[in-house]
Image: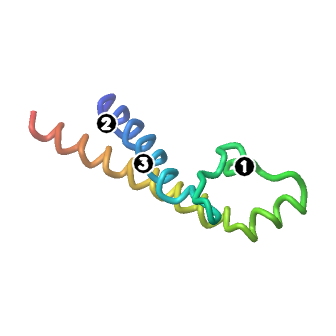
């Protein structure tokens, strides 16, 4: 069980990093969104409107989905490795 949780955590973090590198880009220069800006709750209503216009909600959701897929892959790999023993 412990190995299963460790694999899920590792693959979840890897999924978040890969998702950030893929979906965390914006603008003409294709720069990465600063993590603070991407994961902060907002600086009031104007900050939230600006993030919504920039598409941060969609980017944040895609990054979280990538992390979730990583967790699922880690759990599946853990079950496969456990079954081999």
The answer to which of 27 and 24 lies nearer the viewer is: 27
Q: Are marks 2 and 3 in contact (CB under 8 Å)?
A: no
Front: mark 1 or 3: 1
Q: Crowdedness of circle 1 by 10 Å Cα count: few (<14), some, many (20+)?
A: few
Kindly report the distance in space between the C-alpha atoms of the residues bearing marks 1 and 2. 32 Å
* Residue name at image x 59 percent, y 62 percent: 59
User: Percent x, y for residue 73?
Assistant: 31, 50
Q: Quadrant of the C terminus?
A: top left
Q: Secondary structure at mark 1?
A: helix
Label 3 environment density (alpha carbons within 10 Å; few <14, some 14–19, many ≥20): many
Query: Considering only order in the chain, which callout, 2 or 1, is on the residue closer to the N terminus?
Result: 2
Q: Residue furthest bottom?
A: 53
68 up-or-down from 82: above or below: below
Residue drawn at 36 percent across, 52 percent down: 72
Query: What residue did someone put label 3 on?
Result: 15
What's the CA distance linking mark 1 and mark 3?
19 Å
Quote the CA–CA distance across marks 2 and 3: 16 Å
Along the polypeptide, which appears first: circle 1 or circle 3?
3
Dot 3 lies on which element?
A: helix
Q: Residue at x 63, y 65 (%)?
A: 28
Residue that mark 1 sits on: 37
Q: Position of residue 15 (x, y in %)?
A: 42, 48
Q: Is residue 3 left or right of residue 40?
A: left
At which x and y percent is residue 13? 45, 40
What residue is rendered at 33% in x and 28% in y? 2
Res 4 label: 2
- Of mark 2 and mark 3, the one earlier in the sequence is 2
């Amino acid at each position: 069980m412990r190995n299963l949780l460790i694999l899920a955590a590792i693959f979840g973090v890897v999924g978040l990093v890969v998702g950030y590198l893929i979906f965390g880009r914006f603008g003409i220069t294709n720069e990465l969104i600063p993590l603070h800006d991407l994961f902060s709750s907002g600086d009031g209503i104007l900050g939230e409107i600006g993030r919504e216009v920039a598409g941060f909600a969609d980017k944040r959701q895609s990054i979280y989905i990538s992390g979730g897929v990583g967790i699922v892959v880690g759990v599946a790999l853990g079950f496969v490795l456990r079954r081999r023993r």
